[in-house]
Image (cartoon, coloured by chain):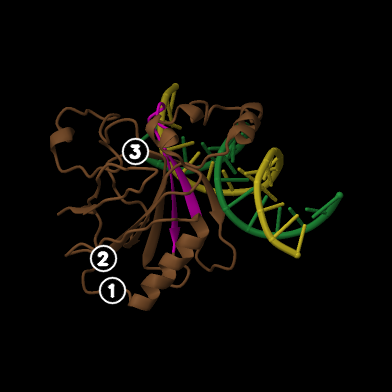
Chain colours: A brown, B yellow, C green
Amino acid sequence: MLSQGFFEDEETCFSPFRASMISVPFDSNQTLSPSQHSKQEEDLTSQFGASHSFTSQSSNANYWAWGEVSGIISNKILGMTRDHDHHLGVSGMNKMKKLKSRRKVREPRFCFKTMSDVDILDDGYKWRKYGQKVVKNTQHPSRSYYRCTQDTCRVKKRVERLVDDPRMVITTYEGRHAHSPSQNEDDSEANSSNVPNFFWL
DNA sequence: CGCATTTGACCCGCGC
DNA sequence: GCGCGGGTCAAATGCG
């Protein structure tokens, strides 16, 4: 089962983006009301400044995906496979400061809203948790921050539960993987398998 | 023992 | 200028 979304505009052009939620136990009988949906979309839009969004709903799973292109992100940035942040993630505050002062551009981000009991969706990549924050005004504990374990890859994701509907998990991906999902494992067979992939051409 | 997670501290941007 | 909140670091801890 594969759901597919396209995301492009005059400045940026993402390749067809494919999302497969095969490993997530979705409840196909539950749906959000349109109002909930649009409210959430609105929230995310305001939060991330999305200029475009799309939604996608598969036949046997309830999830929506938002694609976001902030106005600041140029096709140059998207096309250059993230040269500008090759020093992201290196240790030491000094470098951190340099990075931050330099960092005017945001990575392309995608948000997924999934109805799932598990926080960690198996998207085929390996993630290492590097932080957690308590979200204000929430009874639900926190927002978790993950980085792709591939050391050449700086893709990050953020996972949090919806305040008004704890069944929903919001996963925000930031950046684009520069490798295949299975690269950090024994990759050989995985490429042709049904391992879901995000942002991977 | 090596790697992943936890968690408190820290930095920085932003709004007031 | 100050305080708050989001995001990240890194030491401590846990786990296989």
Above/below status of A193 relative to A92: below
In the visual, does A39 lie left or right of A103?
Answer: left
- Is the residue marked by circle 2 packed among few (<14), some (14-19), or many (20+) residues within 10 Å? many
Find out whether the residues at labels 2 and 1 contact each other: C-beta distance under 8 Å. yes
User: Which of A43/A124 is in front?
Assistant: A43
Find out whether the residues at labels 3 and 1 contact each other: C-beta distance under 8 Å. no
Residue A142 visible somewhere in the drawing: no
Q: Residue at x 39, y 56 (%)?
A: A52
Query: What label sits on residue A126 in the rendered view?
Result: 3
Q: Residue at x 50, y 42 (%)?
A: A106
Q: Secondary structure at mark 2?
A: loop
Is A40 magenta? The answer is no
In three-dimensional space, the C-alpha distance between marks 2 and 1, rounded to whole angstroms, equals: 7 Å
Find out whether the residues at labels 3 and 2 contact each other: C-beta distance under 8 Å. no
Query: What label sits on residue A62 in the rendered view?
Result: 2
Q: Amino acid at mark 1?
A: Thr
Q: Amino acid at mark 2?
A: Asn
- Is the residue marked by circle 3 packed among few (<14), some (14-19), or many (20+) residues within 10 Å? some
* Sooner in the amino-acid sequence: mark 3 or mark 1: 1
In the visual, does A172 lie left or right of B6?
Answer: left
Q: What residue span does the magenta drawing correspond to?
A: A142-161
In three-dimensional space, the C-alpha distance between marks 3 and 1, rounded to whole angstroms, equals: 29 Å
* Sooner in the amino-acid sequence: mark 3 or mark 2: 2
**Image position, residue B7 (x, y; %):** 59, 49
Name the mark nearer the viewer: 3 or 1. Answer: 1
**Image position, residue A107 (x, y; %):** 46, 41
Q: Which residue is mark 1?
A: A31
Q: Residue at x 37, y 71 (%)?
A: A37
* Sooner in the amino-acid sequence: mark 2 or mark 1: 1
